Amino acid sequence: MNDERFPGLHRRGFLAATTGAATALTLAGCGTSGGTETSDGAPRRGGRLRAAFAGGGASETLDPHLASLFADAARAKALFDKLADYGADLSARPRLAERWESNKTLDRWQVTLRKAVFHDGKPVTADDVLYSYRRIADPKQAFRAKASLEPIDLDASRATGERGIEFVLKRPTAEFPNVLAAFGAYVVPENANEFDDRPIGSGPFRFVSFAPGRSAVFRRFDDHWDGAPLLDEIEFVVANEESARVNALLGGQVEYAHELNPTTARAHEGGGQIEIVRLRNSAMQAFCMKTDRAPFDDKRVREAFFLIADRKELVDGALSGAGEVGNDLFGKGYEYYAADLPQRTQDLDRARALLKQAGAEGLKVTLDTSAVAAGFTEAAGIFRDQAAKAGVTIDVRMGSKDSYWSDILDGGTLCCYRSGAMPVEAHISQRLLTDSTTNATKWRHKDFDALYQQAQSTRDRTERAAVYERMQRRLYTEGGFLVWGFADWIIGTSRTVRGVEKKAPANTLDWARFDRVWLA
């Protein structure tokens, strides 16, 4: 690989010049030759699309139940299916589940599977679904969707036929379809445990090759239940630096670059060399305070930090204005979001007074950040300067892009954080319950858990919304997420790419969905 022709691509192992990687790059070079439009602009099959994502280094896996990063989710979506997934409005849409219905008490749900097959030709059955869910729920494992599946009594649930499942729930659950759509709740073949050598799924693409931290190649699955993809192949390549993804796109080494910076988007928007796609209100931007350790085990310190933040300055500076201010709650604009709470603004005098009450005058704290996500390092610098005005000294510590997300889950006290889209209730179940596997703020309160269960069990939507609002009022007052903004999600594509959905927030069904994309 000529580093001068393709600056930045040699860093962080992006298609490192090993024999295998060089072969992958050579094969990828013919990517745009097969996919063409007809004379009337209608899509046609063909070609390999190369998509660049930030990755997770040599520890990457194709196990869909371990999916955590956006690259993991995109690969999992290509290889596997869920019973449901989230539409652009964050409502559950049927996928492998053809339909679902509950009994009157909301504690038993009948799910009927559509006719679908795995890549080896075997049908997707109720036994595969139950195996997958039981694997996710294994108490010895830390699979992402475990907390979301918690309402299901998997011992009592059963297959009622090859394509019928009766889910027995531990308590009435009005929004059970959201459980089926949970991030990471993928269906795998019964007894499957190994996924990195030759994974078998029921997704629109089937496995060809995988080099952790470098690339994964998948080929069109002609028998997919939702129709075969238009592309012959999709190659996911890893480029952790945004500059590497941009340079690869500009240099013709990839046709799709995930997560670009706002400054990059502005430089190329409107008649540039590449197409810019903005997915509005996609990514929560936050600072995450660990509520189980000093100094953030004192809620007065957490409130002080809420008041230190100048959210507009953070959005303008860290996101170059490509987003909107947050109010210390997840899910702005989504169903159940507590929109009536007053917009919090900077109040340095009150922040200083709270720190004094807490005995935290002259506080010094380390803020973990990384170039792993757009705006993280800029946000850390801006917040450090804002905190100094309240007498707080913040030491910004740069973390590894390869291990940042795992490092901050349990380590440190304060860190930069973000999240893609999901329903408010899913955010709560995955991040804010005592047993949540990605509880980065260490928010553990049994009475809060009980409110969540109450909300789930409430049939009337208005009454259910009132419970969620009560929970959010508490998080607004004393939670561990300082949510300062919601960023546009920015994607870059070559001008040959067609069919990229422009209104799908990150983590929803049509985000990073390559079975509907084609090359002109």
Image: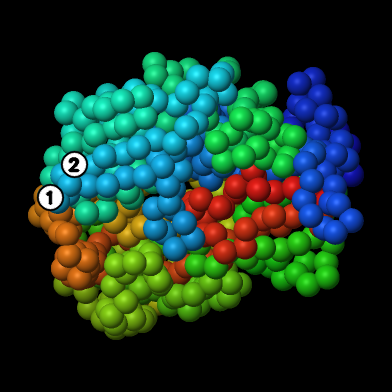
Tell me the element at label 1.
loop
Classify 10 Å Cα crowding around label 2: few (below 14), some (14-19), many (20 and above). many
Q: How is the image coloured?
A: rainbow
The residue labelled by disc 1 is: 105
- What residue sits 64% from the left and 43% below the top? 515
**Callout 1 amino acid:** Thr
Percent position (x, y) of residue 195? 51, 21
- What residue sits 41% from the left and 59% below the top? 90
Percent position (x, y) of residue 404? 48, 43
Q: Where 252 sits versus 41, above or below?
A: above
Asked if labels 1 and 2 touch by Cβ distance under 8 angstroms, the answer is: yes
The circle drawn on residue 467 is none
The quarter of the image holding the N terminus is top right
Tell me the element at label 2.
strand
User: In screen coordinates, is 20 left or right of 109?
Assistant: right
The residue labelled by disc 2 is: 108
Q: Nearer the viewer, residue 241 or 133?
A: 133
User: In screen coordinates, is 444 left or right of 162?
Assistant: left
Residue 50 in sight here: no
- What residue sits 40% from the left and 40% below the top? 97
- What residue sits 65% from the left and 48% below the top? 516
Percent position (x, y) of residue 438? 34, 44
User: In screen coordinates, is 253 left or right of 313?
Assistant: right
**Callout 2 amino acid:** Arg
